[in-house]
Amino acid sequence: MATTSKEIENFDDLLTCTICLETFKVPKYLPCLHTFCETCIDTYIVSSTKKDNTSEGFKCPVCRMFVPFKGTHEDPQAWASKLPRNHFVTSMLDKRAIQRSEKICNSCHVKNKTKEAVSWCTTCEEGFCGQCEEYHKSFKITSKHTVINVQNIQSDQSGFQITGALSCEDHADKIVEVFCVDHSKPCCTLCATLTHRKCENVISIQNAAIDIKQSSQTTELVRKLKENGKGINEIVQNQTQTFESIQTEYENILQDISKLKERAIENLNKIENQIKFELSSSKKQVDLKLTDDIDKFSNYKSIVNNWERMLLGTIRGGSDQQCLLEVNKIGLKFTALEEEMNEAVKRIKYVSFRFVPSDQMTKLTSSTGSLGSFKIHEQCLERTSTSGTLLNKSVNFRTGVIKIVRTIAADNLGQVSAIFVRDYVITARNNIKTVEKYSIDGNFLASLAIECDPTDVTHVNQSQVAISSVQGKVLIVDGTDLKLLQSLNLQDTSVYGLCFVDNDQFIVACLSTLTWISSSSGKKIKEMQTSGSSFFVSTSDKEGCICGDGGHSVSHIVGQTRSFTYSSLQLSSPRGIGIDFEGNIYIAGFTSKNIHQITNDGKLIRVIPSATLGVQSPWTIRFHHITNQFLVTCYASGKVLLCEID
């Protein structure tokens, strides 16, 4: 199928050098598949090797992957010329130039003349004016080349790709002509002769590329790239939030220190600077580690996103042969990168600060030797204390068996909502007006009495939660120390469930109304009417939310528009809505006594009877954001169950 001008425009980011920010001139690509102008990467290589005082290689300007040149006899000034040319990008540039009527005759250009190209040779990859085209056809060696009229390309009437040339990775001056099935390796004739002459299954590149765009191999690789891109983005966001939380905790500790200082005797002034220095030094060390994590996974994200764009660009705008080359190239590199990422994930830890005043400080005696101590709390991201698995590829959320790990709380009747906060569980109990904190093992840790009737709890950041109340209030609570930080009074706004969105807003839900409010002032921003049963609301992504939308339905809402509505007579009185880290949606059917699991575009996956979880009337569902564990609460019994999907 011909690629339209509009489609070519959509891939402009693939045609722009990230060093000079201009359209590629002689595009060369690195082993990580990032592409640069030859002159740009040449200048970068020379300056990089001088700066690092090394002649063994250099780091990619984008993802920082090391590109070795150890053992070569060339100077760094010659490395760029040895890099393989990106024929796919070159063909995209040529096609765009043709479609914009900007392509000039290559033969005339050599003679310092400028004439508009009227035809294109797919073999030579050159444009010709009318006179040069006649010369081209007159030579015996080029007389049988496929030549396409430029006007046909511009109007997308040509059924030909404008190039079929693919550079050999091992011999940049050679063209790929065959494919070794035994090694899944595209080869030039030199590779086939020297390296693959004993292989039994070597076929032409054209035969190997048949139906590659529609193959399960290509589809599965696109799916994996998207899936891992999402997972990496979660980690980057998580570590970024930790970085921000550390700053908040750091500032809070400084305030506590200052307050203690104000109440203490003059002797405390001498030791205040000492503990601030220690705190600052520790924070710098933590900042450096978190920054390294963020940079590392941002680089992974850049690599995966680039590979996805390259593969999608090849599928939409490249030839079958190019697609085959890209699939094999990216597939092999992705497997190695995936292993590297999994190892890196195992080393990531949650980090938080704690400040504990000393006994002497508490007594405010003049003999106090220090203000107190602070601790850096770290928790491995790889597994939680109950073996919940991070990014475990063996977990199939759509078909996996659901089992009960333990009951967190079961002593109180009535409405209860629950949520994970770091390695704890926070519950909001309506009948006794309390917020409670439990360990993952189910042990009660602390409680906070509040004046209103809590109905729902949601995250604000990694350590803070928000509690909604039917009295028209939203309470901001520190989930670590379980203390009230702020109370928002919402005038003329009905509140039951709530969720927090990225742009510092809450969405509160009640009956048939969704209301967006400011998270700092409680001021109403906008509202939207639903078809009812909108007691709870969850954020599905940065743009949208999901809520009950009638007695048998839930809707995904973006702005003021429903992107999809899921309806079923087997679903009655939809209440809590949970979302796992793959994007699958879980709806608590309060009176239908079941849980409906649907895809992120509203298609039914399965209906789970709540009795299998020991729950009579499911009320709320909340997933851990990076494990296979989730919380289910029961309206009738007040149970909070910790479950997981194998």
Image (cartoon, rainbow, N blue to C red):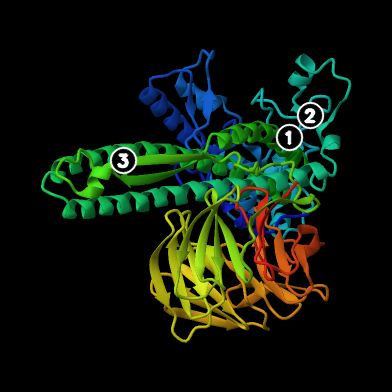
Residue 123 visible: no
For image coordinates 55% across by 46% down, the residue present is 235
Measured Cα–Cα span from mark 2 to mark 3:
59 Å
Circle 2 residue: 184
Q: Are marks 2 and 1 in contact (CB under 8 Å)?
A: yes
Q: Nearer the viewer, mark 1 or mark 3?
A: 3
Measured Cα–Cα span from mark 2 to mark 1:
7 Å
Q: Nearer the viewer, residue 504 or 406?
A: 406
Circle 1 residue: 328
Circle 3 residue: 373
State how many labels appear.
3
From the top left corner, tell me how far across and down residue 364 is, in percent.
19, 49
From the top left corner, tell me how far across and down residue 391 is, in percent.
65, 43
Q: Nearer the viewer, residue 131 or 416?
A: 416
Left/right placement of residue 125 relative to residue 496 reads right
Disc 1 residue type (three-letter)? Asn
Measured Cα–Cα span from mark 1 to mark 3:
55 Å
Q: Are marks 2 and 3 in contact (CB under 8 Å)?
A: no
Q: Are marks 1 and 3 in contact (CB under 8 Å)?
A: no
Disc 2 residue type (three-letter)? Ser
Q: Mark 1, residues whose alpha carbon is within 10 Å: few (<14), some, or many (≥20)?
A: some
From the top left corner, tell me how far across and down residue 516 is, in percent.
50, 76
